[in-house]
Image (spheres, grey):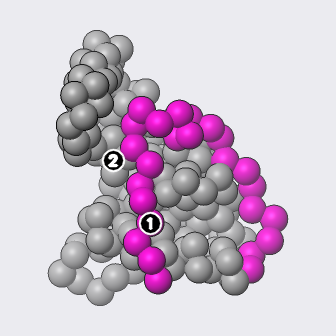
Amino acid sequence: MSILDIVTYPDEFLRHPTKDIENIDGELQQLIDDMAQTMYVAPGIGLAAIQVGVDKSLLIFDVAPPDETRNLHVLINPEIVEKDGAIMSEDEGCLSVPDFRANVKRAERVLVEAYNREGKPIRMEADGFLAIVLQHEIDHLNGTLFIDHISALKRELYKRRIQKQLRHGGPTT
């Protein structure tokens, strides 16, 4: 397994919708394993393939607390087919948007259809924190970042800070 580089804002690659996966093969299984290792080391609770430079409709997540047994979930070609209610995601962050957290309005409940890593169709109903995680990662697959859900002013302030760091050759993390 390998640790993959995480693509960070303002890289335009993050803005491109991903392509559906047609074939679940050994190469895809290796990508899933590499993404899992990358996510755990980062550390994060979710990761979309686009965040590691791969233009595929694939995401992984594990919301188990770090001191508990890992419980990796893999969703291939996921789609939110139903949304209900509203909830405020407090202090949402992202591995691709370093050093920034914000409150984001999300649906309280979602129904997601996808395929698991063996290619079997699954339906996942989620509410609360898990619903937030799924919406965040599926947004990535559609070229949307969580900062697209915040006020234009907050987004612009973050954008200026990152541009200044890039101009001065400083780290963006």
**Image quadrant assignment for residue 76:** bottom right
Badge 2 marks a residue whose secondary structure is strand
Nearer-the-camera pick, 87 or 161: 161
Query: The disc labelled 2 sits on which kind of residue?
Result: Cys
Q: Of the residues tagged 2 and 1, which is closer to the observer? A: 1
| Range shown magenta | 1-25
Query: The disc labelled 1 sits on which kind of residue?
Result: Leu
Residue density around tag 1, few if under 14, some if 14–19, many if 20 or more, within 10 Å: some
Q: Is residue 76 visible?
A: yes
5 within the magenta span: yes
Residue 134, percent across and down? 47, 54
Residue in the picture at 23% in, 83% down? 68
Q: Which mark is residue 4?
A: 1
The mark that comes first in sequence, 2 or 1, is 1
Residue in the picture at 47% in, 36% down? 11
Q: Is residue 134 left or right of residue 79?
A: left
Residue in the picture at 52% in, 40% down? 14
What residue is disc 2 on? 94
Q: Which mark is residue 87?
A: none
Residue 74, percent across and down? 55, 71
Residue 161, percent across and down? 23, 24
